[in-house]
């Protein structure tokens, strides 16, 4: 006798839930589509949908618009706590602490969870080398000649074409090519600030930027940053009223580092208008803007709302294509002349070979194909790392839910400076302790940043479990 209809869907639900229990599908994995399951098991689409609904009711799967059903993340206390804005202008004193705690350079014998670098595995290395070789053969004179301070027009043309994707209409002359986003940030700050001036920054804030601010003898006001909404325009307004020496506001507006939050288009617009009224520059760092989640869209930049030229947009290929090329750029708005002057007096120009190669790579459409793969890869690794954290960290742990990019900000019940030291010295595991994300190294002592740019493997699973044990021993 044929089985009655209701049993068909509950059998399918059992089958899928036992596959989830056996880790055939991991949290964050997409399950086969309704159509695929229906034709594979000869069920009707309705039966498969009912099975999915049953699993959803049991909290095992979740639907995502236009993408199907996914295995749900284990329950997690999300959104690390926000500290309120302390309206106090402070010097930055960080480099010493950062030098003690973060490994830079070529060391390879440690587990890389500290720096926001994508795994070389996901970078189109062979294709880039081919492009470099071909460019060098075709344009030998251009490669060896010293270029203009603004950068090669071939690259600036490509950058101008891509700008519309993030909501801007820019021309090749609106760009200056730099040595990474770091040089771009350095130039932007020097163009609008003098020693002793104040910069508004989000908090927690990327330590590299804080170190640049420190080296220029600037001060900061650290704005409280909500893990999902970002900074508040009201706080910015209050700070502007209190501190006449604020000259710039420096923010990672999309998929920030370390929180992973994105400012809404409305917030970006209000912020741009407010800062323009006070004649304060917005330095907008968009290095993670292209690393949005698959099935979502590219967030606009605040620069898209700039009517006065007071937004300085900064970007680079370090997070998406080749950190080793050290290639970035800046759309300096009304600060263009000053920035060109600073660029030529500082480093004359940016090396031509990499500029020409990246221009070629962009023109061929290869970047878009690569980015599609990279976004899927990074999203999967984020899920896997987050899940491993939930499995092995104490229950009080809180973890960010980044809108994009590939870092997690994690709050744990122990001193994370000690955690970072012990993890590195005893187990060669590198993480970025929370304190280096504050101007004076005195906040976020119970947080750390975990970079998830590498493929999650048994070695990383073991590293996360080790961190979990260390946290328990330090609490
Ligand atoms: C937010 C942010 N801005 C800028 C940079 C520096 O970028 P680049 O390597 O292009 O100098 C980084 C690097 O981690 C970053 O996270």
Image: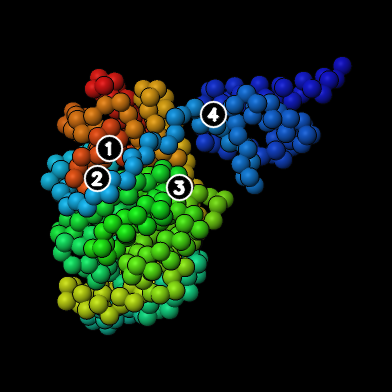
- Tell me, yes or no, whether the two marked residues, 3 and 1, touch with CB atoms within 8 Å: no
Q: Regarding mark 1 in the picture, which secondary structure is present there?
A: loop
**What is the x, y in percent for residue 154?**
38, 78
Q: Which residue is mark 3?
A: 229
- As measured in the structure, the alpha-carbon distance from the residue carrying label 2 to the one carrying label 3 is 19 Å
Q: Regarding mark 3 in the picture, which secondary structure is present there?
A: loop
Label 1: how many residues lie within 10 Å, few (<14), some (14-19) or many (20+)? many
- The N terminus is located in which quarter? top right
Question: Which tag, 3 or 1, sits closer to the chain's start?
Answer: 3
Q: Which residue is mark 2?
A: 438
- As measured in the structure, the alpha-carbon distance from the residue carrying label 4 to the one carrying label 1 is 37 Å
Q: Which residue is mark 1?
A: 444
| Label 2 residue near ligand 1, CB within 8 Å | no
**What is the x, y in percent for residue 302?**
44, 63
Q: Is residue 86 above or below residue 184?
A: above
- As measured in the structure, the alpha-carbon distance from the residue carrying label 3 to the one carrying label 1 is 19 Å
Residue, x 27% and y 49% (percent of image)?
A: 87
Image side of residue 85 versus residue 1, left or right: left
Q: Regarding mark 2 in the picture, which secondary structure is present there?
A: loop
């Amino acid at each position: 006798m044929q089985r009655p209809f209701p049993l068909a869907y509950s059998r399918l639900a059992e089958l899928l839930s036992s596959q989830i229990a056996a880790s055939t599908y991991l949290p964050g994995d997409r399950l086969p589509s309704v159509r695929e399951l229906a034709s594979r098991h000869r069920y009707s689409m309705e039966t498969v949908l009912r099975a999915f609904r049953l699993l959803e009711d049991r909290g095992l799967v979740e639907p995502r618009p236009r993408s199907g059903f996914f295995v749900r993340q284990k329950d997690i206390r999300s959104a690390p706590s926000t500290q309120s804005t302390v309206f106090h202008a402070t010097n930055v004193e960080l480099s010493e602490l950062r030098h003690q705690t973060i490994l830079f350079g070529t060391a390879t014998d440690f587990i890389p969870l500290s720096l926001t670098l994508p795994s070389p595995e996901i970078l189109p290395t062979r294709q880039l080398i081919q492009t470099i070789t071909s460019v060098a053969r075709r344009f030998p004179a251009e490669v060896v000649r010293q270029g203009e301070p603004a950068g090669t027009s071939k690259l600036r043309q490509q950058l101008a074409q891509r700008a519309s994707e993030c909501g801007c209409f820019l021309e090749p002359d609106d760009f200056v090519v730099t040595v990474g986003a770091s040089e771009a940030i350095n130039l932007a700050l020097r163009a609008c600030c003098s020693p002793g001036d104040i910069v508004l920054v989000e908090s927690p804030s990327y330590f590299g930027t804080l170190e640049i601010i420190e080296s220029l003898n600037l001060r900061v006001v650290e704005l409280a940053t909500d893990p999902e909404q970002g900074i508040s325009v009201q706080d910015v307004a209050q700070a502007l009223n209190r501190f006449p020496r604020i000259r710039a506001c420096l923010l990672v507006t999309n998929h920030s580092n370390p929180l992973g939050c994105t400012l809404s288009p409305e917030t970006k617009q209000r912020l741009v208008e407010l800062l323009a009224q006070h004649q304060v520059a917005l330095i907008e760092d968009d290095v993670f803007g292209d690393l949005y989640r698959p099935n979502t869209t590219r967030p606009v930049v605040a620069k898209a709302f700039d009517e006065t030229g007071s937004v300085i947009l900064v970007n680079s290929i370090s997070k998406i294509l080749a950190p080793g090329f050290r290639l970035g750029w800046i759309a300096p708005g009304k600060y263009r002349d000053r920035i060109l002057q600073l660029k030529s007096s500082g480093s004359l120009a940016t090396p031509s070979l990499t500029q020409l190669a990246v221009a070629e790579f962009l023109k061929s459409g290869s970047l878009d194909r690569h980015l599609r793969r990279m976004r899927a890869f990074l999203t999967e690794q984020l899920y896997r790392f987050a899940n491993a954290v939930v499995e092995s960290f104490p229950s009080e742990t809180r973890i960010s839910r980044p809108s994009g990019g590939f870092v997690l900000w994690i709050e744990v019940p122990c001193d994370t400076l000690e955690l970072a030291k012990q993890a590195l010295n005893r187990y060669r595991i590198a993480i970025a302790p929370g304190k280096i994300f504050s101007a004076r190294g005195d906040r976020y002592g119970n947080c750390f940043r975990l970079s998830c740019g590498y493929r999650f493997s048994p070695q990383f699973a073991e590293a996360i479990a080790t961190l979990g044990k260390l946290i328990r021993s330090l609490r």
